[in-house]
Amino acid sequence: MISRQLVLTYLYLLIYVCLSSGVILFNKWVLSPKYFKFPFPITLTMIHMAFSGIVTFFLVRVFKVVAPVKMNFHIYATCVIPIGAFFALSLWFGNTAYLYISVAFIQMLKALMPVATFIMAVLCGTDKLRWDLFLNMVLVSVGVVVSSYGEIHFNVIGTLYQVTGIFAEALRLVLTQVLLQKKGLTLNPITSLYYIAPCSFIFLFIPWYLLEKPEMDVSQIQFNYSIFFLNALSAFALNISIFLVIGRTGAVTIRVAGVLKDWILIALSTIIFPESIITSLNIIGYAVALSGVVLYNYLKMKDVKANQLPADTNPDRSTKDKKALNTYRPDNSMDNNDGPVIGGLTSEAAAFDEEAPLIPSARLSYVTRTQTGSFSNR
């Protein structure tokens, strides 16, 4: 007989894959000038931020589902505001790319996320330049270049927007590691949205007021409240689904599910959006890029294992590791899971998914610098 726990695990994975793919396709449909015809990516992102901020406010302050962390002005100014600023930039540039390039090509470009994060980590001093990792980055980059060369509807502006959004997200991840580790903060998905969403909304308001508001005043676009409510609700639900999946399986499993989701999403996008055409060169290049990502993950996993001393030879280290791994566990979780959740959600999930502005724990795993993922590209 199949156990109930196993069924729930696969159910959570299925929900995650469906929500993640659905949110990306939903956003593309809303922003596309050929379909819903709402070409205002900053506005759409601000709606997501406002919705997340309001919902998490009620969950934290009114219903008290989770308790807020000890946050003072100094920590907020030195940690949350810089992270929220680069998060807003990644959303802005990443969502704008939907106006110019296809969903399939965007997913292929996202293979550059480990390259961008590795570069930012080396520049910020949180990682060392190693030739084995560098060669993996070259392999990933070559795969993306080949995939881009095979793109029929290649658009320079859209590609620049997407790549810039990826590097902004990579810098956000590195800042998250540096700043929050330094302060010893660990936030779960709800509290991370509670603190970051309002900050990102404010940063997005400035470019919205200067760039999109004048166009909206003259465009006379009808605002469909039900569509935008469902869109924001889907994005918020995706955050929770990622949290539940990692709480039950771990970041490595959701990384594998994310790769599967990318292939499914690329195939679905060509069916839903007929103008999105995939060539054999696209597929070959993306496969090369993913092979580099997989090898990179393997090398980082070996590093983590090599740095961990056996528990029986170092009892103090074992105790410290156990405490770190059990930093946060979901309150009253649906699955009554006994497994540890690393900081509520590792930055791996935050890095690769489009609707996950979630904060990693104070003890990051090797997946901290793997490929993307936002909330960042709605």
Image (tube, rainbow, N blue to C red):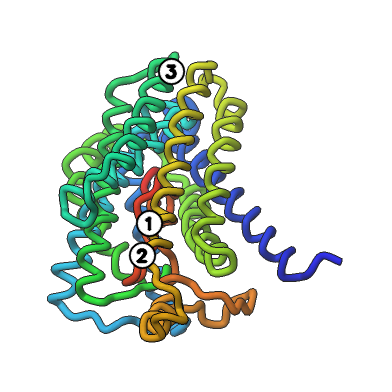
Q: Quadrant of residue 69?
A: bottom left
Say which of marks 3 and 1 sits in front.
1
Residue drawn at the location 55% of the way across and 44% of the way down: 21
Q: Secondary structure at mark 1?
A: helix
Residue 180 x, y percent position in the rendering: 25, 69
Q: Residues within 10 Å of mark 2 (few under 14, many from 20)?
A: few
What amino acid does circle 2 point to?
Asn
What amino acid does circle 1 point to?
Asp
Q: Quadrant of residue 267?
A: top right
Frontmost residue, 166 versus 215: 166
The N terminus lies in which quarter of the figure? bottom right
**What residue is shown with label 2?**
307
Q: Residues within 10 Å of mark 1 (few under 14, many from 20)?
A: few
Residue 303 is marked as 1
Residue drawn at the location 28% of the way across and 75% of the way down: 185
Residue 175 seen: yes
What amino acid does circle 3 point to?
Glu
Residue 193 seen: no
Q: Are marks 1 and 2 in contact (CB under 8 Å)?
A: yes
The C terminus lies in which quarter of the figure? top left
Residue 228 x, y percent position in the rendering: 46, 49
In terms of sequence position, does the residue under pointer 3 or pointer 1 come before the other? 3
Residue drawn at the location 51% of the way across and 60% of the way down: 242
Q: Determine whether 264 is above or below 309 in the image.
A: above
In terms of sequence position, does the residue under pointer 3 or pointer 2 come before the other? 3
Residue 151 is marked as 3
- Judged left or right of residue 343, residue 201 is left
Find the residue positioned furthest to the right: 1
Q: Determine whether 228 is above or below 82 in the image.
A: above
- Judged left or right of residue 349, residue 208 is left
